[in-house]
Image (cartoon, rainbow, N blue to C red):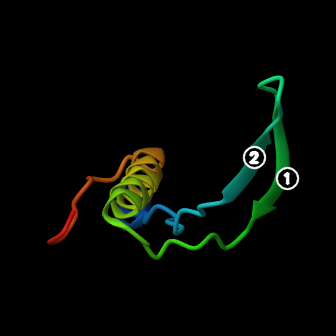
Amino acid sequence: NDQSDHSAQRNYQPFVTIPKILGFDFMIDSFQNPWLLEINRFPGLEPRSNLDSDVKHSVIYDAWVAAAKRIDAPIVFGPGF
């Protein structure tokens, strides 16, 4: 029935999850080959310097943008972003 289909579409809420950020630790050997040392499920996102803050802010921002695009949601951020 068309009416119930339209009602279901109006009530549909996309499933939203918080983006997961992983930390990948690499080592570069003397031949410039990268070696994956570990993958951190909970990387430290607390900045230790101004440069570190800029990098981590960018990673967090990009993760949220990717999550929003995945569900075709508007990208809206509060103060500080």
Image coordinates of residue 35 in percent, x first then y, are 85, 39
Quarter of the image for the C terminus: give it: bottom left
Residue lying at the far top in this picture: please name it. 31
Residue appearing at x 37%, y 62% in the figure? 7
Residue 58 versus residue 74: which sits nearer the camera?
58
In this image, 30 relative to 8: left or right?
A: right
Q: Which residue is mark 2?
A: 26
Could you tell me how far apart the alpha carbons at marks 1 and 2 are, in whole angstroms?
5 Å
Other residues around mark 1 within 10 Å, as few (<14) / some (14–19) / many (≥20): few
Q: Secondary structure at mark 1?
A: strand
In this image, 56 relative to 10: left or right?
A: right
Q: How many marks?
A: 2
Q: Which residue is mark 1?
A: 37
Identify residue type, mark 2.
Answer: Phe
Q: Secondary structure at mark 2?
A: strand
Residue appearing at x 85%, y 52% in the figure? 37
Which label is found at residue 59?
none
Image coordinates of residue 23 in percent, x first then y, are 66, 59
In this image, 61 relative to 32: left or right?
A: left
Image coordinates of residue 15 in percent, x first then y, are 52, 64
Other residues around mark 2 within 10 Å, as few (<14) / some (14–19) / many (≥20): few
Residue 54 versus residue 64: which sits nearer the camera?
54
Q: Earlier in the sequence, mark 1 or mark 2?
A: 2
Identify residue type, mark 1.
Answer: Leu
Residue 32 versus residue 20: which sits nearer the camera?
32
